[in-house]
Image (tube, rainbow, N blue to C red):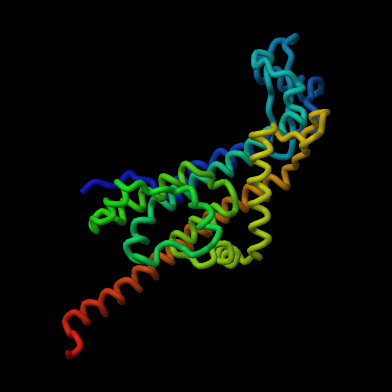
Amino acid sequence: MGVSTTLSPKEVFENSFRLAQLMLDVYRMLENDKVITESELLTKLRGVVGARSDEMLQLILNSIFVGIIREEARIHPSTLKRESLDNLLRQAVVSACTAYETYLSTLLGEHIHDVIDMKGADFFPSDKDVTEYFKGLSLPIGEAFRLLNDEESSVFLGRKIVSYVQNKNLGSVNGLKTVGLLLGLKDPWTDVGARLNRKAAEVTKVVGDCLQRRNDIVHRSDRVLNDESGTRQPIAFSWTSQAVDTTRHVCLALDEIVAQRLIQLREEFLVAQKFFLQALDNPPPK
């Protein structure tokens, strides 16, 4: 028997998220108060790397990294100033939010068919935000007749919902809420907050701010709205690290919560199925 090569939603997330962590790590490595171009240490290192006496070298020295940039790299010292390195932090934000959206889409696609089968007519949440989210979903008459086939109705509906979600924006805090409700959770953000031992409002705000900052970066190059000078918003490593880490922890927490909920739904489904079969075998007397 062959081993399945299909990645789980969690694995898909970790693969997507890796770039965000890499950007933070590279930022820490290159962070500097000033690139060193003349020093006794650099003179000694020149011989170590075999550099010519007239070759321009740039030394980056901080608490975790020592690096020499040689002339052939064609990297101007201004490229390593803090203002330029801040772009690594912005890319970390973008990558973390992309991983968040990719994860939610993959998680829904992985489990929605099982949830529809187990919950049946009670599948779709009554939450007003979810109803609003799906107001653009249409079902042409030809597709509606496909639902008459019980064997394929759940698969068809599941694919229809996943396709709609994948073509719509999941990049908001309501994206997680919608996916969580569709997968059988009663209050996704409260559940996530409890799992992380943090207040739901606090976690939601951090992720929401991260997603909003991603939009600012992608759509306005992170420039201050209505500022004619084109000033960019300041960004700090500490804020970025918190936003990126919180986004990761939220997705990992949701993965654990959904896994537990699916086990509960399966147990409830089996119990209901057992009572149904017993009722068929023992119909009430006429």
Horizontal placement of 43 versus 3: left or right?
A: right
Q: In the image shown, does 285 or 8 lie closer to the viewer?
A: 285
Q: Dividing the picture into quarters, in which one does residue 225 lie?
A: top right
Q: Does residue 81 show up?
A: yes
Q: How many marks?
A: 0
Front-most of residues 42 and 285:
285
Q: Nearer the viewer, residue 174 or 8?
A: 174
Q: Is residue 122 left or right of residue 145?
A: right
- Asked whether residue 89 appears in the rendered view, the answer is no
In the picture as drawn, the residue positioned furthest to the bottom comes out as 285
The residue depicted at 71 percent of the width and 31 percent of the height is: 85
Position of residue 202 relative to residue 285, above or below, is above
Estimate the x, y position of residue 30 in percent, counting from the top left.
70, 32
Q: Whole-percent x and y of residue 264?
A: 39, 70
User: At 48% from the left edge and 57% from the top edge, which residue is drawn?
Assistant: 255
Residue in the image at 34% along x and 68% along y = 266
User: Against 147, is 233 above or below?
Assistant: above
Q: Quadrant of residue 73?
A: top right
Residue at screen point 63% across, 36% down? 91
Q: Split into 4 quadrants, where in the image is the C terminus?
A: bottom left
Above or below — where is 64 with respect to 122?
above
Q: Residue furthest front?
A: 141
Question: Looking at this view, is 181 or 250 the one in front?
Answer: 181
Residue 7: x and y in percent read 38, 46
From the viewer's perspective, is 95 left or right of 88?
A: left
